[in-house]
Image (cartoon, rainbow, N blue to C red):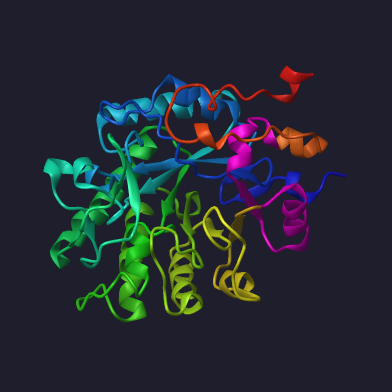
Amino acid sequence: MDPKLFNPLELGDLTLPNRIVMAPLTRNRALPDGDVPHDLNATYYAQRAGAGLIISEGTQISQEGKGYIQTPGIYSNEQVVGWKTVTDAVHNAGGRIFAQLWHVGRISHVSLQPDGQAPVAPSPITAKSQTFVATGFADVSDPRQLDTGEIARVVADYRKAAENAKAAGFDGIEIHAANGYLIDQFLRDSTNKRDDAYGRSLDKRTRFLAEVLEAVTSVYASTRVGVRFSPFSSFNDISDSDPLTTFGAAITRANDAGLGYVHLVEGETGGPRTYPPNAIATLRANFSRAYMANNAYDRQLAIDAVESGKADLVAFGALFIANPDLVERFRQDAPLNTPDPQTFYGGDAVGYTDYPTLDQVA
């Protein structure tokens, strides 16, 4: 009998054929003119349609939400058409795909912003971080604080992005609230120093998240929506004085919104699985539906997590980059291709759509 990792999971009204998820992975391969997805992206995602669920790379909800060159958007008609090419290819290959909706907040550069304006943030605190622009790596720009009255506009951008995702044929959406980007910046007390209805107290710091979730679940059934958090990650110069309490409250907001799953980066983003003892179980107790685990999992760790009930789904990043048929390789316990980090960000088909499947190397 197959391990439970390979068994179906009901995510609301959507049946996932297995519990192996392709994590959202920034690849910087949208068309440079308009940040539009195209045929190469469709091939890449369709190759990985054996995943129980694909979560797209972060796709910015507005130009203001952009933080890196050649990341795709989902706010223009051309982008929606481009994403429809991707979702059609995935569906034709038998897959399921969610769009990850993204606003980077302060992790941006004036060269990427409309009219060269400053990036926006909950508070005007500059991150000690870099981003990737046309000339290479650059320090992020000093942000300006979003006025209270502007926040409704950003929430509306999330709602419109959800509508565009639906028009583009996505089966659902994931809200990116991790890795030091805008929603994470609102949640954490190191980056949110506001004195209005969106700052200081825990209830206020989680309000922006709650409003975004309310907006997008007016477009998609709530079980077709997930959210990603990284409670113990310092990625993009972010921290919190009490992450268990902060993210316990944030996950409670997600539970109250009826979301289909909560997705946690367990430890440092792209780094070690370091977090306080029992922290993941403590956070998970605030959520009554599916839990998606992420960060440095291998086949056996994933099998053990699902068999023990510690996770319902497990997301894989770099292994899916290098192994388009990762599910079948895991099922057979077959050797894996080795990812090439030199081709992760930007470029062409090399290191993107040219990794061989088991059939191709047989």
Q: Can residue 214 be seen in this view?
A: no
Residue 282, magenta (yes or no): no
Split into 4 quadrants, where in the image is the N terminus? top right
Instruction: Return the residue nearer the eye: 251 or 64.
Output: 64
Identify the residue at image location x=59%, y=70%. 275
Instruction: Return the residue nearer the eye: 68 or 50.
Output: 68
Identify the residue at image location x=60%, y=75%. 276
Q: In this view, does 339 lie above or below 125?
A: above
Q: In this view, does 94 lie above or below 67?
A: above
Instruction: Return the residue nearer the eye: 198 or 215.
Output: 198
Q: Position of residue 305 (x, y in %)?
A: 73, 59
The residue lying furthest to the left in this view is: 115
Identify the residue at image location x=63%, y=30%. 324
Q: Position of residue 346 (x, y in %)?
A: 42, 31
Q: Position of residue 336 (x, y in %)?
A: 73, 35
Please provide the residue range marked out in magenta: 297-326
Q: In this view, does 218 lie above or below 246?
A: above
